[in-house]
Image (spheres, rainbow, N blue to C red):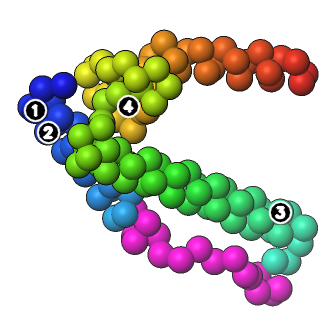
Amino acid sequence: MKKTELKKIKEILLERREKILSQAASVGEPVYSFKEEDLLDEVDLASTESDQNMSIRLRDRERTLLRKVDKALKKIEAGDYGKCEQCSEEIGFRRLEARPVTDLCIRCKEEQERIERSFADERA
C-alpha cells in the first residue's frame, strides 16, 4: 500500500474514532432506572424498557466499532495494516477505503458469509 493511501486510511480511522467518542460524550451516561410515578401503565413501562434496550445495543455497537478502529490504528503503527488475517493477501485499497476496519479480503469475507448463511439455514 502506498504511503498516501495509508495516510488517507489513517485519517478516516481517526475521524471515525473522534466521532464515536464525541457522540458518546454528548449522550452522557444511560439511565437504567426510572421512577415508578413516571410509568403510569404497562405501555409506558414497555416503551421505557424498549428505549433502554435500544440505547444499550447502540452503545455496544459503538464500543465494538471503537475497538475495531483502535485495532486498525495499531496495525498501521505496527506496519501490519491492509493484510487479510485469513489468507495474508493484501486487501485492496478501495475495500479499505470503504471499510477501513476490515481485516479480511473480499474473497475471505464472502467465504465467511457463505459459511454463516449455510449454518443459519441448517438451524432454520
Nearer to the camera, 68 or 79: 79
Vertical arrangement, residue 23 with respect to residue 65, above or below: below
Residue appearing at x 19%, y 45% in the figure: 11
Q: Position of residue 112 (x, y in %)?
A: 61, 21
Three-letter amino acid code of the residue under disc 3: Ala
Report, in whole angstroms, how far the alpha carbon at label 3 lies from the one at label 1.
52 Å
Report, in whole angstroms, how far the alpha carbon at label 4 lies from the one at label 1.
18 Å
Q: Earlier in the sequence, mark 4 or mark 2?
A: 2
User: Could you say whether the residue bearing mark 1 is in a helix, strand or loop?
Assistant: helix
Report, in whole angstroms, how far the alpha carbon at label 4 lies from the one at label 2.
15 Å
Q: Nearer the viewer, mark 3 or mark 1?
A: 1
Q: Which residue is mark 2?
A: 7
Say whether residue 31 is magenta.
yes
Asked which quadrant contains residue 123, the reply is top right
Report, in whole angstroms, how far the alpha carbon at label 2 lies from the one at label 1.
6 Å
Three-letter amino acid code of the residue under disc 1: Lys
Nearer to the camera, 56 or 105: 105
Report, in whole angstroms, how far the alpha carbon at label 2 lies from the one at label 3.
47 Å
Q: Nearer the viewer, mark 2 or mark 1?
A: 1
Mark 2, residues whose alpha carbon is within 10 Å: few (<14), some, or many (≥20)?
Answer: few
